[in-house]
Image (tube, rainbow, N blue to C red):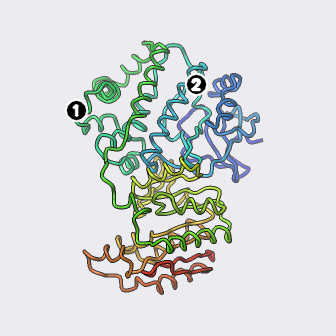
Amino acid sequence: MLGATSGDNAARVAGSFRDPAGYVFQRGDNIYRAVTRYGAADYAAAKMAGIFQWLCDEGRLVRILHEQPGTNENAIILEVERLPWITHPYEWSFQLLKIAALFHLDLHLALLEKGFTLSDATAYNVQFVGPNPIFIDHLSIRPYRDGEFWTGHRQFCEQFLNPLLLRACLAVPHNAWYRGSMEGIAVSDLAKILPFSKKLSWNALTNIVLQDKFQAGTSSKERKFSVKERKLPKQAFTAMLRQLRNWISRLQPADKKKTVWADYSLVNTYNDAEREAKHNFIAEYVRSAGPKTVIDLGCNTGEYSERALVSGATSVVGFDYDVQALDRAYENATARNLNLLPLFLDARNPSPSQGWMGTERLGFGERMKADGLLALAFEHHLAIAHNVPLEQLIQWLLLVAPTGVIEFVPKSDPTVQRMLALRDDIFPNYEVQEFERILATHSVIERREVVSQSGRTLFQFRRNY
């Protein structure tokens, strides 16, 4: 019996420590949620009301696979569905964050109709299966108490609303700021930089300006007293959520000017025959190596992610630095029903492990492992644009997956020529022969093919360690 996280190779998830109602732990490849005696009554109420079954049947909540009695401080142990990927809000594109915010509000509204509510509003309780959101925290669901305030309002604003407003009002992507603060963008910070004209709307006034004034002018003790003593009718509660939902549903990025790579999938250096050769190489790799999960670095709008899926991969996580390309990748994934999750990545500075004790939110290297890797038109952005040595670059790429395809873009290619036009060529060893030599040191090169007149070369590898 799994009554605690000690023994049986069970390990508590480092970031699961804030909720007194329970915590998550792992045993082998299986994921469990311990329900403490503190949270047992609320869990039982939701279970008896059929809340978990209803949400699981609708695909809005991760499934409970098995339930058994706990021991000691844990009343119940749940084995829950394991998701293929865990991601963080600072890796989401604008569109993913917006979808997650609307999903969270819709879930809350649906629960209120059935006499339940959410105890918090953290964005980390929303994950994605492909481009589709799913809720992962069963213990955030509890019975609604008549007249209670929305205690998660500030958290929702800082982790969902404010990051969206940063780009919708100021044309600034949320990713770097969110990662730096981890808990979102503080109301007080957004209030300082939001233009005066944007503060005049009722939505901004109630969710940003007045909330900032309230926090600044009231001590935490007085706030606690106010929330306990005052009542908020349920009708007003739901109206508040609906108003937020309507506002967020209309938000769009303010940066309308196209970025450099937004149209790369349509305007690039390939002709039709070269593009087809690249597609065929990817398809043959997936058929021969058989990766089920694939990470696509530099995915752009997801063209080659889709090719991997069509050829036999079951899920792809794509990464790119261009926020407009990511928004398009999300639109393509939803329109074409692809199991593709496009995420933000600055490969020069991947998401680190951070938070409490440096382990609360695991970094890119700890979370993002797959069966296969696509790194197409990617390496030169690090090797040429940012002086990353080929040896280090190849070793980093091979840590992501044991098999894959890497594209080498030579100096003769127009893209690299443009990159070198305004700087000295300090890369005497940046040659395809040196790239192949290093790759062969760490892997078996199973195929290579020149796929463009400029000399772009695809390498299919199998890691030898």
The answer to which image quadrant residue 372 occupies is bottom right
Amino acid type of the residue that numbered disc 2 sits on in the rendered structure: Leu
Indicate the position of residue 464 as horizontal and vertical percent values: 63, 77
Question: How far apart in space, not on screen, are marks 2 and 1 (Cα)?
Answer: 35 Å
Q: Using the rendered image of the protein, determine whether residue 382 is visible from the camera's viewpoint.
A: no
Indicate the position of residue 358 as horizontal and vertical percent values: 47, 52
The front one of 29 and 294 is 294
Secondary structure of residue under mark 1: helix
The answer to which image quadrant residue 350 occupies is bottom left
Task: Specify the quadrant that holds the N terminus.
Answer: top right
Give the answer, above or below, for where 379 lies relative to 5.
below
The front one of 356 and 439 is 439
- Relative horizontal placement of residue 344, taking residue 116 as reference (left or right): left
Secondary structure of residue under mark 2: helix
Amino acid type of the residue that numbered disc 1 sits on in the rendered structure: Ser
Residue beneath label 2, please? Answer: 111
Q: How many marks?
A: 2
Indicate the position of residue 381 as horizontal and vertical percent values: 39, 69
Residue at 40 percent across and 33 percent down: it is: 157
Dot 2 surroundings within 10 Å: few (below 14), some, or many (20 or more)? some
Residue beneath label 1, please? Answer: 197
> Of discs 2 and 1, which sits in the foreground?
1
Residue at 50 percent across and 30 percent down: it is: 105
The answer to which image quadrant residue 404 occupies is bottom right
